[in-house]
Image (cartoon, rainbow, N blue to C red):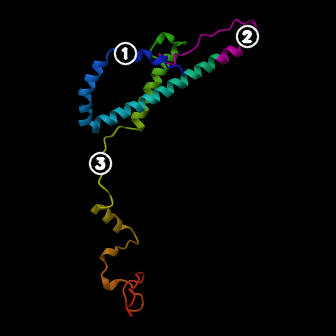
């Protein structure tokens, strides 16, 4: 696999390494103390970016397929060998508008990106959530359990109310102690 695509990014990081280190020294404590709000925002941004990347890849390959189909369906031009459509989208440098051919594909991607943001805001709103206490030990959960039909709280039973084993002993399921000889 060719990783030359990342070479400009690596060159930039190498030339500005001191700035990135100093910036991270100041930014990481800030992110730590505001993690309740900053981590969900970062994850939300990453999620939207993944949706953008998937949309861009799909459009790129749809345009490639349409170019191939258009070239193959021109029978007279194919026989003459003169058909060559210059349709395409940049897979890597997606911000360069002049590389989009036909030009409306760039505008279509912007419109779809706005629709993705609106859909994510509508169907997956970002909410900062509180850490809940365990529901098994709260008084509210005991009240809810008691409200259920057929619920019986065995912790309220007295020893006299326990079932017997028929021999005067308590607890039908308890094993009785063996008698000494």
Residue at 40 percent of width and 88 percent of height = 178
- Mark positioned earlier in the residue sequence (3 or 2): 2
Nearer the observer, 13 or 138: 13
Residue name at image x 34 percent, y 73 percent: 153
Q: Nearer the viewer, mark 3 or mark 2?
A: 3
Horizontal relation, residue 162 to residue 1: left or right? left
Snapshot quadrant of residue 151? bottom left
- Label 1 secondary element: helix
> What residue is shown at x 32% (from left), y 58% (from top)?
135
Furthest residue in direction bottom, as rendered: 181
The relative height of residue 90 versus residue 130 in the rendered view (above or below) is: above
Question: Residue beneath label 2, please?
Answer: 78
Q: Secondary structure at mark 2?
A: helix
Residue at the farthest front position:
181
Q: CA distance from mark 2 to mark 1?
A: 46 Å
Q: Which mark is residue 131?
A: 3
Examine the structure image and report whether residue 131 is included in the region drawn in magenta: no
User: Dot 2, crowdedness within 10 Å: few (<14), some or many (≥20)?
Assistant: few
Label whose residue precedes the other's in the sequence (2 or 1): 1
Determine which residue is flagged by label 1. 12
In the shown orientation, is residue 142 left or right of residue 49?
Answer: left
Residue located 27% across and 63% down the image: 139
| Residue segment shown in magenta | 68-93
Foreground disc of the pair 3, 1: 1
């Amino acid at each position: 696999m060719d990783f030359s695509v990342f070479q400009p990014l690596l060159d930039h990081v190498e030339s500005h390494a001191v700035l990135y280190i100093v910036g991270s020294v100041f930014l990481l404590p800030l992110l730590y103390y505001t993690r309740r709000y900053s981590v969900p925002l970062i994850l939300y941004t990453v999620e939207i970016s993944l949706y953008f990347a998937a949309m861009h890849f799909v459009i790129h390959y749809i345009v490639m397929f349409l170019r191939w189909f258009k070239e193959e369906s021109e029978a007279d031009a194919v026989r003459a060998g003169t058909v060559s459509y210059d349709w395409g989208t940049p897979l890597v440098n997606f911000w360069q508008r002049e590389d989009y051919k036909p030009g409306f594909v760039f505008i279509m991607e912007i419109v779809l990106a706005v629709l993705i943001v609106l859909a994510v805001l509508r169907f997956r709103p970002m909410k900062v959530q509180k850490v809940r206490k365990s529901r098994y030990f709260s008084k509210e959960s005991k009240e809810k359990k008691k409200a259920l039909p057929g619920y019986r709280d065995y912790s309220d039973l007295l020893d006299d109310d326990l079932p017997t084993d028929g021999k005067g002993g308590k607890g039908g399921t308890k094993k009785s102690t063996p008698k000494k000889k």
